[in-house]
Each structure stands twice: as C-alpha cells, then as structure tokens.
Image (cartoon, coloured by chain):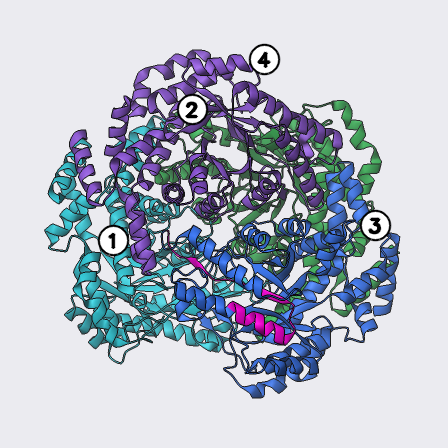
Chain colours: A blue, B cyan, C green, D purple
Amino acid sequence: MSDRAYALFEEQQKARGIDLDQVKAKLKALKIETPSWGYGDSGTRFKVFRKEGVPRDPFEKFEDAAQVHRLTGLCPSVAIHIPWDKVDDYGKLRRHAESLGLSVGAVNPNLFQDDEYMLGSVTNADPAIRRRAADHLLECVDIAKETGSRDLSLWFADGTNYPGQGDIRKRKAWMLEALAGMYKAMTPDMRMLIEYKCFEPAFYHTDIADWGMAYNFALKLGPQAEVLVDTGHHLQGANIEHIVAYLIDEKRLGGFHFNSRKYADDDLIVGSSNPYELFLIFYQIVNASIDPDPGIRSTVDNIAYMIDQSHNIEAKIPAMIRSVLNVQTQYAKALLVDHAEVERAQLRGDVLGAEDAVRRAFEFDVTPLLHAVREEQGLPLDPMRAYLESGYGSGILARGKGGASW
Amino acid sequence: MSDRAYALFEEQQKARGIDLDQVKAKLKALKIETPSWGYGDSGTRFKVFRKEGVPRDPFEKFEDAAQVHRLTGLCPSVAIHIPWDKVDDYGKLRRHAESLGLSVGAVNPNLFQDDEYMLGSVTNADPAIRRRAADHLLECVDIAKETGSRDLSLWFADGTNYPGQGDIRKRKAWMLEALAGMYKAMTPDMRMLIEYKCFEPAFYHTDIADWGMAYNFALKLGPQAEVLVDTGHHLQGANIEHIVAYLIDEKRLGGFHFNSRKYADDDLIVGSSNPYELFLIFYQIVNASIDPDPGIRSTVDNIAYMIDQSHNIEAKIPAMIRSVLNVQTQYAKALLVDHAEVERAQLRGDVLGAEDAVRRAFEFDVTPLLHAVREEQGLPLDPMRAYLESGYGSGILARGKGGASW
Amino acid sequence: MSDRAYALFEEQQKARGIDLDQVKAKLKALKIETPSWGYGDSGTRFKVFRKEGVPRDPFEKFEDAAQVHRLTGLCPSVAIHIPWDKVDDYGKLRRHAESLGLSVGAVNPNLFQDDEYMLGSVTNADPAIRRRAADHLLECVDIAKETGSRDLSLWFADGTNYPGQGDIRKRKAWMLEALAGMYKAMTPDMRMLIEYKCFEPAFYHTDIADWGMAYNFALKLGPQAEVLVDTGHHLQGANIEHIVAYLIDEKRLGGFHFNSRKYADDDLIVGSSNPYELFLIFYQIVNASIDPDPGIRSTVDNIAYMIDQSHNIEAKIPAMIRSVLNVQTQYAKALLVDHAEVERAQLRGDVLGAEDAVRRAFEFDVTPLLHAVREEQGLPLDPMRAYLESGYGSGILARGKGGASW
Amino acid sequence: MSDRAYALFEEQQKARGIDLDQVKAKLKALKIETPSWGYGDSGTRFKVFRKEGVPRDPFEKFEDAAQVHRLTGLCPSVAIHIPWDKVDDYGKLRRHAESLGLSVGAVNPNLFQDDEYMLGSVTNADPAIRRRAADHLLECVDIAKETGSRDLSLWFADGTNYPGQGDIRKRKAWMLEALAGMYKAMTPDMRMLIEYKCFEPAFYHTDIADWGMAYNFALKLGPQAEVLVDTGHHLQGANIEHIVAYLIDEKRLGGFHFNSRKYADDDLIVGSSNPYELFLIFYQIVNASIDPDPGIRSTVDNIAYMIDQSHNIEAKIPAMIRSVLNVQTQYAKALLVDHAEVERAQLRGDVLGAEDAVRRAFEFDVTPLLHAVREEQGLPLDPMRAYLESGYGSGILARGKGGASW
C-alpha cells in the first residue's frame, strides 16, 4: 500500500509542478536539536512527577537522545544546560556524544536557579551578583570551546514582579553590559542566540520581553548575535510567523525553541495545539529559502531548530520522537507550497486564491512522502512504533525514579 | 496631622451624604482569611527560593498568621490545606489557633501532589484513583468537623494537556459524582465552595474551567454548594466584577481567593497589579449589600474573603499584611460610592456622570478613614511599620531555612 | 487519479476499521445554514468596502445563497436578519426560497442599529425602549411563523462601556424578562438559541458575556431555549470544544455561528485561522453522536450549523463556498477518528497514544472522500472551480455597487 | 475647604520631601493634544450613533477643541486628519486655530478609507496604488508646512486577513520605501511618529504590528523618526510602561495616542479602565525626566501627548474634558513618587518597600493640588462642571445631527 500511496502522491505533486527530489533532499537535510533537559523530569509549580527510567546524568541523557536520532535521523545534536549538565571533563562528554553518532549542540547558561538570583542575575542591583552571573556566561563560552558548540543560547529569567521593584532602564544597561562581555569572549565562529519571553517567572516585567528587545540587543552587539524564537514565549494572539519573516528579512533569526501552547508558556509537544501555526512558520522559512538575496538564504540555512519542552506527564523519549516528527511533518507540508501560484494570486489581488494556495499544501497527507524519505535513509517507516517495539524504554527502567530534572 | 486629615475627610464625605459611622462599622466587620500556605515557601516551576524563618509546621503557620491579625485586626481565621497541614490531632490545632485569637478557616483538600493523580484525581479514568480522591474529600469533611470549619474550599488541578487525552464528558460525570459524595457527607452548616480555573497545571482543558461550570455543579448539588472566585483564574480580559455581580444575583457566590495578576495565575499580592479592578469588585458587592432582596444581602454577608497567593520573592508576613491592607483600602473606597447618584445618572442616560460617580470614590485617599478605624479598634495606625518594628521578623529567623512549602 | 485515490483511501480506512458508508451517509446529511447578510457588504469600523454585484434585496440574497447550495449541496437554508431582510410579504420570501430549493432558516432579530438602542435594548434603563425591543422580539416570532423557521437566533449587543454606566444586576433581570416574554410567544416546535459574546460593541461589560450566562438563562426559560456558540465570541485561550462538549452533555447546545479569528471577533472564514480547532469541535460532536444516551444523540442531531462571518475583502459567494467546504472538510476528518482506539489509550493512561489517535484523523487528506461523496450526490467535484467557471459571478456585476450591507 | 485641603496636602508632601513648586511647574507645562476627529461622530462596525451638535467641518472642530483648552488649560493644539480635515486653505485653518488660542498639531495621513486601499496602501502589491499612497504622505508633509505642524503621525491599516494573502517581506520593503520617501521630504524640524498596532482592521498580520517594527523602521530612517505609542494597540498583557521606558532609553519615544481598553482597541476614555497603568506609564516618564543623560531628558521633554479615542456613546466635548483630566490626574500622582526612596529600596532588595513607594504616590488624592494649580492659572477648579454650566453644549445643538465622522 505504501508504494502505491507514494506513486499517487508523486503523480499529484508532479501535476502541481512540485519537484519531489528537491523536497526529499530538503527533508533529508532537516536537523532538529533535542535538549538534554527534555529527557529529564520536569513539571509545573504544583508538582514534578518523577518518572521511572529518567537519565541520572548527562551521559545517559545523550544515550536517550541517540535513540531519537537513530530512529528518526533528524536529531544529530543535543543542547546542554549548565550547570544541569556540568561534568568534570567536557571533552569526555563530547567524545561520548560522538561515540553515539551525536554532537554537543547549543550551550545554555542557567541564571535562575541560585538563591542569589532571586532578584535578577545579570540585571541584579547588586554588582557582585551581576559579576557572578557574567562569569557564568564566560564559563559557558569556555565550555562551548571544549564541546565544539557553535551556539550559545541565552534565556534570562530576569525581571520583576512589581512596579518599582527594579529600575527598568538601569537593568537594560546591565543586560547589555553582560551580553557585550560574553560577546567579546566568543570565538569568530560562535553565535549568541538571544531568547525573549513575555512573562514567567517574572510577572510584572521581563528584561528581554519580546523579539524587539532581543533584536535591538543583537543589533548593538554585532553580527554574531541573533534572535532565538521560542514558540511559547509570546502574548496571546502574537503572529509568530510574522516575527519569523521579519527577523529573517533582517538576517537576525538565529534559531527556534519549538514547543506548543494554548495559554501561556505551556511547553507542550510542538505542533500539538495548533499545527497550522507551525506550518505557517515553515511556510515563511521556505519562502525565504528561495529569496534572490544570498544573505537571506544563508540566514535560513543557519537557523538552529531546537526543541524546548516540558514533558510533565508524557513518556520522555516517545514525547521527543513525536515532537520531531511533528516538526518534520509540517516542514514537509510547507515544502509543497507552490510559491509562484501564491504570488500570482497576490498580484491579481485574489485573496481567496492566495489563501487556498497556501492552505492546500497543509491539507496534503505527507505520510507517503515521509515514508519514502525514511526508506531511502534506511530508517524505520514509523519511528514511534519502532521505538516502542525496541525494548529500549523498558531497558532504562532499571535506572529507577528520581533521575535528573531540569 | 492625622486628626486634621480625618476631620477634613469627614467634612468632605458628609457633604456628599456619606454616613461615615456606617462605613466605619462595615470596615470593622471586614474579615479576611489568610491561608496557612501563604506563610510557607512557594515558587515558580523554575525555582522555589527558600526563605529564612519560614514556619516549619502548621502550628508555626498559625503563629505567623496571628501576627497579621494582631496588627491589622482583619484576619481572625486561617485556611488550612490537607495534607500540608496534616496533624495528628486537629483538636489541638484548633485550640492552638484559639489560644492565638484565631480560628481554623476553610479546609482545602489537595488532590494534585500525589503521583497517582498525574492524569487526574476525581476525574481519573482509573476508578481506584477516583475512589482514593473521593475518600480524601470525605476525610476533609471529617477534619472540618474537628476544626469547626464552615467552608470546604475545593480546587481541582484535574484536566488534560492534549486533545483526546481524556474523555471530557465522562470526566464531567466523575467530577459530579465526587462532589455529590462529599456534599452528602457535609453537615447542614457546612458549605462547599467550588473553585474554577481556566488553565494550569492542565494546558489543554481543565475540568472546572470557568464560573459557569462551577456554578452548574453547585446548582446540581444543592444550596450548600457555592462558587469560589479566585481573582487570578480567568482568561485575559474577563470582567470579574460582572461574574461577581452575576453570582451574587443567583445567590451562589460563596467566596474569593484574592490575588492579582497581569498575565496568567501570577498569584501576586492582591491589588498590586490593577487596584481599580479590586475596587470595582467591591463596588458590586457593596451595591448588592443594599439590595431590597434579603437573600441577596445574606449572600453578601456570607462571602468568605480569603487570600491565596505565592510570595515567591517577598518576605512572607509583610506580604500578607500588604495584601490585607490592599483589600481593606479598596473596600473602604467602595463604601464611599454614592449609589443613589450613580443610579440617577444611569436613569438619565448620563454615561459620563455615572462613570464619574463610581470612579470618584476610588480617587479618595482613605488613609485618614483607615487611621480613624484602627485607632478606634486599638490597632497600630500603620500595621506594616508596626510589624517591621516589632522584632517578630528577626525572631523567627532562628527557624532557619527549609521550612514548609506549599 | 481520483478513482485510484479513493480506492487507496478506502483501503486505508478499512484497515483502520472505519465504516466509510456510514461516514459518507453522515457527510451527505450535513447541513450548514448560510446567512443572508453574508452576501451583503460588511466591513470594519474603519471602512466598508462596497463591492460590485452585491445583492440589493433579500430576494437576491437568496439567489446567491442558492448558488452555494447548488454547487456544494450543503446549504439548503438561509438565515435572515430583521430588519435587514424585512419584506412586506414573508410568504412571498418563503416561496421565493422554495422555488430556489431553499428554505428560510433562523430568524435573527436586530436590536443594535436604532439610535434608541445606544445604551441598550432589552436592558435599557428606559422602560419604553425595553418595551420596544421586546416587541421586536415578538415580531420576529411572528415572522418565524410565516417563514416556517424553527430557530430564533438571538444576539444582543447590550452592554456598557464604563463601570457604573449600567446596573449589571438590574440589566440581568431585564434581559430575563425580555427572553421570557419571547419564549412564551414561541410555538412548541420553535427553539430560542441564545448567543453570548465576551465583548464588542460593548467594551466594559456585555449582558450575555459567556456561555455560562447564556446557559443559565436557557435553564430558567425552559427546554426550548438553548445556547448558540459563535466560534469568534470567546476570550483568548478559551477551549471552545470543551464548552461544546459541556453544553451537549447538558443537552443545551442549540447551534453554532461559525467563523474564525486570531484576535477578537475577526469574523474570518471558518477554519482559516486554526483548522485543528474546528476539527476538535467536530471531534466532540461526533464523539457525542455515538453516546448511549438518546438525549445526547438527539441534541447532536439538532445542532444548527450556521455561518456568521464578515467577508470584508473577499468576493462574497466564493468566500461562502470556501467556508462551507472548510466545515465539511473538518467534519469529514472528525468522522475518521477511531473512538475505541482513543478510549483504549485513555484507559491505559497512554497520553501520547490518545493524542495520536485523535490527531491522526486530522492528518488524513479527505479530498478523495469528499470527491466520492460529491460524485454520488451529482455535485461538481470542485465546487469553487465550478462556481468560478459558472459565469454567475460576472452575471451579478450588473447589480452594480452599493447593495445591501449588514 | 479647598484651602485647608491644599494646606494639609502641602504639609504631607513636604514631610515626604516633595518639592510642590516644581510639581506645580511641571503640571502647568503639561500639554495634551486633542484630535479633531475626537469631536466628530464615531462608532463600532455595528453602528455609528449620530449625535446632535457634532461639528460640521474642521473649523467647528477647532471651536470645540478651544472649549476644552479654555477650561482645562491643557490642550493648546489640535491634531488633524487628512482628508477628513481637508480644507482649501490651510493657512486659513491655521489662523482660525490661532484666533482661538490654538495651534494645529500633528498631521495624520489617512490611507485606509479609499476603495483602492482595500488590500493595502503603501504595501499594496499594485505599484500604482503604492505610488498614490506615497503621494498622500508627501501631501501631508506639505500640509504640515502650511499649518506649522512639527509632527507627522503615521498609522497604517495595512495588513492581511489570511495567510498567503500578501508577501510579508515584500510588504516590509514597500513600507520602508514609502517611509523613506516621506522622511526625505520632511524639513529638519519635523518629526515622523510611527505608530504600530497588533491587529484591526487587519486580522492576520499587520505590517507594523508592534513597537519593535516601528522602532526598527525609525532606526533605518534617521533621528527624525520616532515611535508613537497608542495605549490601545497592544496584545493582552503587554507591559506598556516597559515599552515606554525602553523607547525613552533609546531616545526614540516620540509620543502617545492615549485611550484605554479592556479587550482590544476599545478606544475608551484614557484612564477609565485601568488608571494605575496610566500612572505607571507616567512614573517611567517622570523617572526618566531626572536622568543624568541630557538626551534622555530631551526625549522626555519632546514627548507628544495626544488623545485618540472614539466616544461612541458619550457626549463629545465632556468626554474629551474627562480624558485630559484623567491624564493630568495620573501625571500629578506620578510627580509625587519619591524616586530616591524607590531606589534605596531597590538597592537593599526590598521588594515590598519599592512597590510601596511607587503605589503610595498613586493613592494620594491630588484634587487639592490640581485645584491649586488651576487657581493659579485662572482656570475653573472643576472644568467639567464649568463646561456643563457654560451653555456651550446646548448652543451647538443648532448644528443638528449628521456632522463630521471619522
């Protein structure tokens, strides 16, 4: 059935003028970084449910991540979080990764879990605490050198809960100071990815609250600083794909933290709440990938796709497999948009025609295409089933409860 | 200066036809219940900052609560949370409370912190877990008998994170079943207060998501079931005072969990984010308190005002003092509305006049009034300063870090 | 290609245990009412763009609606709005409809376009205006008798812009009074569908602001009163499918006003902003349609599906065709959910499995199925193309600009 | 009573170390521009209620605006909207304004009310329409030269309703092109104020959707381009005062369009929905006004405060008086913040102390202060009452209904 399904799919797409070889090549080139902390326990403020079989250390996290990559072919790198993934010897961690067919991805500093950071880290009114936080940023640059990581991925919990609690403009200056110090320490091949978030854990103001603030810091720092879009970090109603297109156009979109949400930063499996939104984000990306401007195309080529979620109630590894499959699915659909058709409709002012040309690509069932790609790559057609049947999940139960948490 | 300030205030209000004796009497009758868990450590999902001096057990929580009451005269009762406040002998806890001039207030079951409740408590698909949860509800009724508590205050974390995860309608039936079992166990003088919340910790659907669902359950259960409004549990833009007025009109408003928010359920100090909203809630309550219908008036008289907040970064006891003072302040302002003036403006279609008549009451500085009331009650004029100067805060530091958390 | 596509689709679904004959039968039974005002000009507060060819009177609106039905087979009835569709002889309008193969659907009173209603219609503080508004409701009952309409569809713009402007509880009583008067005038086969809306055109409080208020009025009125869910009338984040499931369970879901939105009541083409949400609404409906309780099933059978949108910039008739096709598409997908599989996953606590079982149905491309259904019904496979090629759109240009607006 | 009230107020504030002379001087310097269109009819998409006495032409609008200034002393300039305020001779309009003690304020182009702009003005896919729109911008620069206006205030309705309808990145380039053309035409003393809006009338994407986009355009254009913050143009939860502080810090805050909202762009009277938010905006402004950096202080000095509201149901002139009084009130309160006290609390990490120091200023009743200022300025103590007693409102009824609308 699978062969006939693909044959039919191929016929349909050819009739639309879609070059499936190119689509497949793009799908094979897709890389999605999974986060080490996505394999550990997480929860809400009300409860962290401890799961059996959760990795007990960074090395085991990479082992779990390797399973995801082995079955999907999509996830060759793993982001780390310091100090959650602190080890004595980062060279050893790197070699461990490599032995599993992985590399160490983005290095994420953590500036929100020490008692001293209660009122801010790099934006704390106390210069000694700011210094300590800045030192941690520099430490992460050093770690990135050892792990061979290109990207430093920065999310700050810094903000305030009440009017007056902090001096908003001074904190802005302190933030810039810390970022500038880190920027200077980076090697020329490194990138600083600046994340923003509208709220939580700060409930009045967050020092880097939206893409405009992250982007403005990046502008001041230099070309190695770019913006990181976390799909769950926007106010209700924000048009994320607009922001994505805007940042690509400014050549400052560095990457994504993918997850999905219905309310706040729910950190659910990406594509599970509103799959069309994920598709529309990829539609903008794919559209930019054929831009005449090589700078735009290069920006697109260097987007770091990363998962950042909290699987509070789901089995960790299957949740990660589901996540990367959802990303792959929506990317595949976006690759089926006929951009010339959209443009023709735009030029003749045909609102319904243009909308239809985009939405129709979303409505295709890309299962046959993904099966064909996986077959060509020697991967299981159904990675989820392959995982469930692999026995890996029951094997790790021996780790017991109480493993790492983020 | 204080005397002259009050004299002037009195003159102003008399000129407006406000009966200050009645206002003062109402202010003296105001009672705000503080929650035992508001004295313990709390945090966000990212971090719980452990504070020095936090109570180590329920008895110490009552001691801290007694300070708040001693200085403000507003907080004669303390809500408890089971099992956080589980003790061997509730009679002993009750006597401890009484020895401090307090009583035990609402009993709050906790159905979200056991591993078994990961996929729901009373709405879990597993009947054994539902049974266990229902038993806990009955246990809380028994505890309320021992503590002499009138109110059982019910918040359920039950909900789902993904479409399909649970059967929404079956869960609704299971919820009703559990509530009905508890209702039957209550003594005739008890009340069941049903709380609702739009999201968190569930991120797709919450079994009791809004006031309509809580109200409908109350209707089905009987007259001892009422709705509890938590001011932080609404979607952005919800007109809370409208809901309050509506529920009073249906004689089903049982009480409040006060806190304030800008984004989600931020659980900040009540009145700190949008004080006018708190005033407008009280405006509806005060307006209903002079309704010709004695049922309406009785509903108003029995509203349980309760604080429910997370003081993640603030000193616990001062945060509680600030909270109850904010409630008192907005209530005092609401007592200054000239309802007849508002009504006259409404009847002549004078939009601006009616708005002005309400807002003007908010704009008065009620400090002289509150000073006068406190003086008559033998309370410190400035309870916050009195607390800070009392030495109590430094005395409890001996408790060390790592006390109770919610 | 179409035949092979359907053969493959059939094979796939049979392998899943889906009874396609039943699915087709359900699809053929789907009826979506289009609104007369959807064929006229509409706009935002900033501008109404006047289109060529817009109907000049109710009769022409029915002619346009007949085109939509002729090509889709989905829209045998047309809702009318009084006084926009006021005619001297409703019998004549009914016969005109019948001659076009249509019937007159829900009657919608209009209580927001007269100067007198500036501060409210049925909730106006002036009893004379309330009387006038109530009379209009009765007039609509009379019209429904003449047009043979079962449903009276009620949306009230009533509300206030400022605190104090109106007495919320008095207005509640006046609303009930008006509804009760209308209810009494209805014949036993009529239904009152009560719509709610969180805001707009009122910006402080809206008298029927949410489903809970609409539902509570319905409860007080009697079994012929039900709730009408307009998919654009909720606060950001509201879980509409939860409300739908809840109302079905209470046997009080009367119908829908379909449209889609990203921000407020955007009134865009249904299914264009978040198609998964529309699918999930139908998933709840389909799930209830197989409930053992015949009352639940009967409620589902009687749901009135209606479009209510503003095609400000789109061609009117194509926009309507697109809308009903989107509804049909998502309904078709929802019919492919394997409810037994979902339930098994729920019972074993398999969050990811349950989610997958629902989402997978959404990911099927139902084009082959819809083509098959249309073929069996003697309809054009692609109704939109058929319309564009029909010449009807250019024929009506002779009507000129400045036709009816809502 | 007024004298004693002020004496007491003065005593209180002196005890806090507030320099009331300086406060008064600042209050006397406050200027709030009212919009010509605020005196005309406006409405929602459902209905524009036509009022008696609304101005019939731009000249009458200035006459009404003169009343507001005469009674409040706050509103010496009036913004105009082209073509709503199109006149043959702008010199005549300017002299008319001057004869009334007014000047012509910001010039606002209108690019959303012509049929050609249905799919965009400066971002339309049709180059002829873009040219036409760009020409209108240049026309407005010419008008500003004639009227002596410093500010060109730009709001674009440009955006799309559906994914695919427009090419987001091309539209961005077209927007920049149009702005650059206008910028070049400006004289060195002119300013371009770029407004942003999250949605409406576009419901999928708006070309200038948030402050970041407006700011980025300003950066590209040059120092005469700044951002205009409309307080109603943000997504729910946005921290506006943070944006304000951020833009001041970048020396790119050009001005405000004041109004208030609870839901979307409700365009209600500023300060009526959440007065504390307005206070907090002014707190940031006042805090920046004492910054050591002269560039920051100069930015603050040049902020254009403008009203932009829709008084759909209120009497026009009284609504404007109420609006500017609300602004004055919150500004006065912000002037009472003891910034040194706030800073001390911030430095010692005293969250509650810092919050209290800000909120306390809000809680003062500034009526005595405003009375004193008005008295010193020879203005009526109660401008609203003075207006209502002036007879002006009944005098203009002779204009009849059907005056100008925006």
Residue D314 vertical placement versus B383 (above, below): above
Q: Please give the range of residues in magenta.
A: A137-163
Looking at the rendered structure, the kind of residue marked 4 is Asp
Residue matched to label 1 = B325
Chain of the residue under label 1: B
- Alpha carbons under labels 3 and 2: distance apart: 60 Å
Element marked by disc 3? helix
| Residue B210 appears in view | no
Q: Which mark is residue D88?
A: 4
Query: Which mark sits nearer the N-terminus, 2 or 4?
Result: 4
Quarter in which the C terminus of chain D is drawn: top right
In front: C228, or D193?
D193
Looking at the rendered structure, the kind of residue marked 2 is Lys
Residue A48 in the image: x percent, y percent? 47, 73
Looking at the rendered structure, the kind of residue marked 3 is Glu
Residue C160 placement, left or right of D349: right
Callout 2–callout 4 Cβ contact below 8 Å? no
Label 1: few (<14), some (14–19) or many (≥20) C-alpha neighbours in 10 Å = many
Residue matched to label 3 = C375
Q: Residue at x 27, y 81 (%)?
A: B88
- Alpha carbons under labels 3 and 4: distance apart: 64 Å
Rendering quarter of residue B210: bottom left
Q: Nearer the viewer, mark 2 or mark 4?
A: 4
Residue D243 in the image: x percent, y percent? 48, 46
Callout 1–callout 2 Cβ contact below 8 Å? no
Q: Nearer the viewer, mark 1 or mark 3?
A: 1
Residue matched to label 2 = D316
Element marked by disc 1? helix
